[in-house]
Amino acid sequence: MKHKIAIVGFGGMAGWHLNLISELENLEVVGVWDIDESRRELAVAKGIIAYESLDALLDDVQTNIVLIATPNDSHKDIAIAAMKAGKNVVVEKPVTLNSADLQEMITVSEETGMLFTVHQNRRWDEDFLMVCEILKENQLGEVFSVESRVHGSRGIPGDWRQLKKQGGGMVLNWGVHMFDQIFLMFPGVKLKTVHAITTSVTNQLVDDGFRTELLFENGVRVLVEVGTSNFISLPRWYVQGVNGTAVIEDFDKRGKMIIAVGENEKDIVPVITAAGLAKTMAPRREDSIKEVPLPEVTADIRDFYQNVMAVIEGQEESLIKLPEIARVMRLMETIFESAEKNEVIAFEN
Ligand code: NAD
């Protein structure tokens, strides 16, 4: 079956989808709607139909999927209108701005029977999948701490992303990916508590970064941090197990994993510093540790749309489940609450 998709919002991310879709046999972009005339002209220059309005896009009977790639505050109304017009809907992340709005969208999806899903594309990031593999294979022994960071140094982009009303800020922008990843890493494990701070280094309008500590029921502590004033980036992932440590530096998956081997050292040679002596922090003896290769993983983001099409055809279940999306939304709300009160908040799973 050939699927036909129309795109609402023909900005930066729509261009990315356009390239991705061009690699898929059974999916074709038929047209776009954007409130900005210059973006509609760009679509026409690329040989794509530009509709005269959202209604015109929704009236096109040949389209069975609508992708919504507009600023975050407009996702809800467009998604609801599209589902009511009989279209399956793919919404960019964050799905919307709060749990109440999300529930409205889910209700319309249930009432209309249309597919409603979210482009959580960072589930296909290979650095993330490497950490999942390390945990699954128990390569570090029992894991007690995971640190997930994304650092940049350009502040927050100067467009709608710095407006609270439009769903700007780094919690909604990057946090939504990172929390989704963390929940997937610990399937079925309840999150007990959340503590968070948000930062406003480069502007006072929205959070331009945040740091949050999550404590899971199994005792694992997770630090999730986004910074936009970090001229030196800390590693993307730092994972500690009782028997080893793994570092993944960046999206290119550079990094290393060190595990303990043999018996624990008994005759520790202290490290002598300029002003003292330390045994606890002395480097490990070479024969008591081993560097092992990070796991190799491969992922193909085309699987996102392959799954969307298979769900529409009734052949597969959606890889992105709405209760997962709702849980991440509740976590983001809890983070804002914790940051505002500077309190540890119990999480409602
Ligand atoms: P953008 O500003 O580049 O593009 C948004 C486009 O939407 C603009 O062309 C604008 O004119 C148009 N627009 C605004 N309101 C509209 C409306 N009501 N109807 C029709 N068109 C409208 O933004 P972007 O970077 O493309 O981001 C779009 C969405 O994609 C956001 O939700 C963002 O969070 C998401 N995004 C996701 C990823 C990812 O990796 N999944 C990456 C970047 C952006």
Image (cartoon, helix red, strand yellow):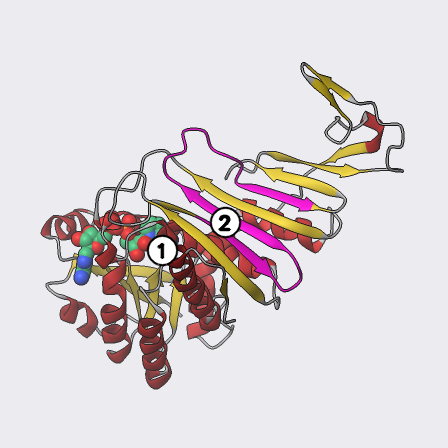
Which residue extends farthest top? 274
Q: Can see residue 20?
A: no
Q: Amino acid at mark 1?
A: Leu
- Could you say where residue 97 lies in the image, as x and y percent from the top left? 31, 64
Image quadrant where residue 291 sits: top right
| Residues shaded magenta | 211-240
Q: Nearer the viewer, residue 171 or 102?
A: 171
Q: Amino acid at mark 2?
A: Val
Q: Nearer the viewer, residue 331 or 291?
A: 331
Q: Nearer the N terminus, badge 1 or badge 2?
A: 1
**Would you say the beta carbon of the disc 2 residue lies within 8 angstroms of ligand 1?**
no
- Could you say where residue 297 lies in the image, as x and y percent from the top left? 61, 47
Q: Give the class, few, some or many, for how many residues have Cα within 10 Å of label 1's Cα (few <14, many ≥20).
A: many
Secondary structure of residue under mark 1: helix
Q: Nearer the viewer, residue 137 or 66?
A: 137
Which residue occupies 47% across, 33% down?
A: 233
User: Which residue lies under the disc numbered 1?
Assistant: 172
Which residue occupies 32% across, 43% down?
A: 200
- Could you say where residue 92 lies in the image, as x and y percent from the top left? 34, 59
In the figure, is residue 195 to the left or right of 9? right
User: Which residue lies under the disc numbered 2?
Assistant: 224
Q: CA distance from mark 1 to mark 2?
A: 13 Å
Q: Is residue 195 above or below residue 309?
A: above
Examine the structure image and report whether residue 217 is included in the region drawn in magenta: yes
